[in-house]
Image (spheres, grey):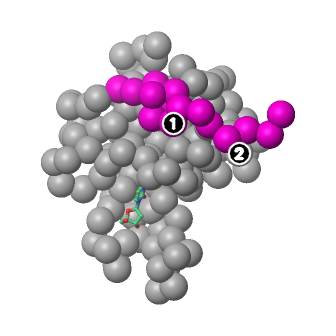
Amino acid sequence: MVEESILKELIKGAIDARSKAYAPYSGYKVGAAVLSLDGEIFTGCNIENASYGLTNCAERTAIFKMVSEGKYEIKAMAIIGSGDTPAFPCGACRQVISEFASGDTEIFVLYSEDKYEVYKLKDLLPHTFKLD
Ligand code: THU
């Protein structure tokens, strides 16, 4: 469970990050914020490319920022898309989240600042691919 005040910060982080999205091709801006297990917040936006397939989703931007700062465990995540429908993480992002999260990690899928749904990773991505 994430404390109310931390969740507010996480949501604010996702919203702020969305404002930095580079999405000239789709026009669809996404923001994400990751809370590391030790309580730090990392944010990210989607970054598109003229070679469309090179686009990086907001979730992966935030996670890669966390990992490149030496943190490897996600406690919770918040994601916000554009418009009033929630942006669920795409399949590729779910797999990347699973690399650094547990099945019980909470994913807050936002409609707006004060409306969201919360899912456990194991419900978004059952039977995760893992090498072990
Ligand atoms: N996008 C994300 O940032 N996260 C997702 O989980 C799904 C899609 C972005 C990629 C692209 O820039 C835009 O949304 C439209 O697909």
- Foreground residue among 109 and 40: 109
Q: Pick whichever of labels 1 and 2 is earlier in the sequence.
A: 2
Is residue 120 in the magenta section? yes
Image quadrant assignment for residue 108: top left
Whole-percent x, y for residue 37 in the image: 64, 24
Going by the image, does 48 lie left or right of 85?
A: right
Q: Which residues are magenta?
A: 118-132
Q: Secondary structure at mark 2?
A: helix
Residue 76 - label: none
Q: Is residue 66 visible?
A: yes
Q: Quadrant of residue 119?
A: top left
Name the kind of residue labelled 1 in the image.
Answer: Leu
Residue 73 higher or lower than 24, as above or below = above
Q: Give me the residue at 32% from left, 62% from top.
A: 29
Residue 89: % across, % down? 43, 47
- Considering depth in this image, is 46 or 118 the residue closer to the camera? 118
Residue 124 in picture, x, y percent from top left: 45, 35
Q: Ligand 1 is in which quadrant of the figure? A: bottom left
- Residue ID for mark 1: 125
Q: Is residue 9 at all visible to an observer of this figure?
A: no
| Residue at the image position 45 percent from the left and 17 percent from the top | 2
Q: Amino acid at mark 2?
A: Val
Real-space CA distance between mark 1 and mark 2, rounded to the nearest whole angstrom: 21 Å
The x, y position of residue 107, in whole percent, is: 44, 31
The residue sitting at the front extreme is 127
Q: Secondary structure at mark 1?
A: loop
- Magenta run includes residue 27: no
For the residue carrying disc 1, how many other residues have a C-alpha within 10 Å: few (<14), some (14-19), or many (20+)? some
Q: Which residue is mark 2?
A: 67
The image shows a total of numbered marks equal to 2
Q: Residue at x 30, y 52 (%)?
A: 81
